[in-house]
Image: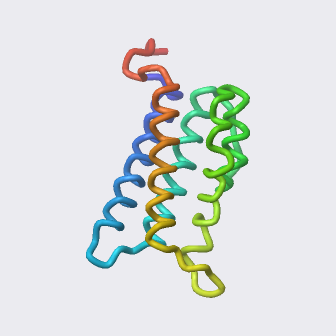
Amino acid sequence: MSPKVELVREWLTLADDDLRIAELAMKDAEPVCWAGAFHCQQAAEKTLKAFLAYHEFHVEKTHDIEFLLGLCKRFLPEVEQFIEKGSALTDYAVDSRYPAPRAEVTQQQAKQAIEMARSIYEFILNALPDLEKLPQE
């Protein structure tokens, strides 16, 4: 498998793991909303970085979902549909994990974050070719 395809697959595997962790955090009898939201931000970030890696576009370290979506838009204009609502995920990258001052993440916000992260993940996954069928470089 080519290094590029391997990198894309690694990003997507990590993104999928983050989505599953987010969902688990919310299924608990006492949901850990900040953790669910944080892992949604991570899932979206890793998904978008996978897409950019596929297009061999290097991006510096960033947690800014709106910025990453803007970069992806160069290759896939349809990602614009996620910019307005998806950019809200950026707030969960750092602020949700540390003590004051931080805004509490509500259960509703965490559920919306899961929906948004899953939508971005599925959209990008469908936009990428089947990685298993790509020629070995």
Residue 7 at x, y percent in the picture:
50, 35
Residue 44, compared with residue 98, is above or below; it is above
Which residue is situated farthest in the bottom direction here?
A: 100
Residue 20 at x, y percent in the picture:
34, 54
- Left or right: residue 27 versus residue 58 is left
Residue 9, compared with residue 91, is above or below; it is above
- Left or right: residue 30 versus residue 19 is left
Residue 133, compared with residue 114, is above or below; it is above
Residue 85 at x, y percent in the picture:
62, 52
Residue 124 at x, y percent in the picture:
52, 33
Residue 53: quadrant of the picture: top right
Which residue is situated farthest in the top direction here?
A: 135
The foreground one among 117 and 130 is 117
Q: How many labels were placed on the picture? A: 0
Which residue is situated farthest in the front direction here?
A: 108
Q: Residue at x 46, y 32 (%)?
A: 125
Which residue is situated farthest in the left direction here?
A: 29
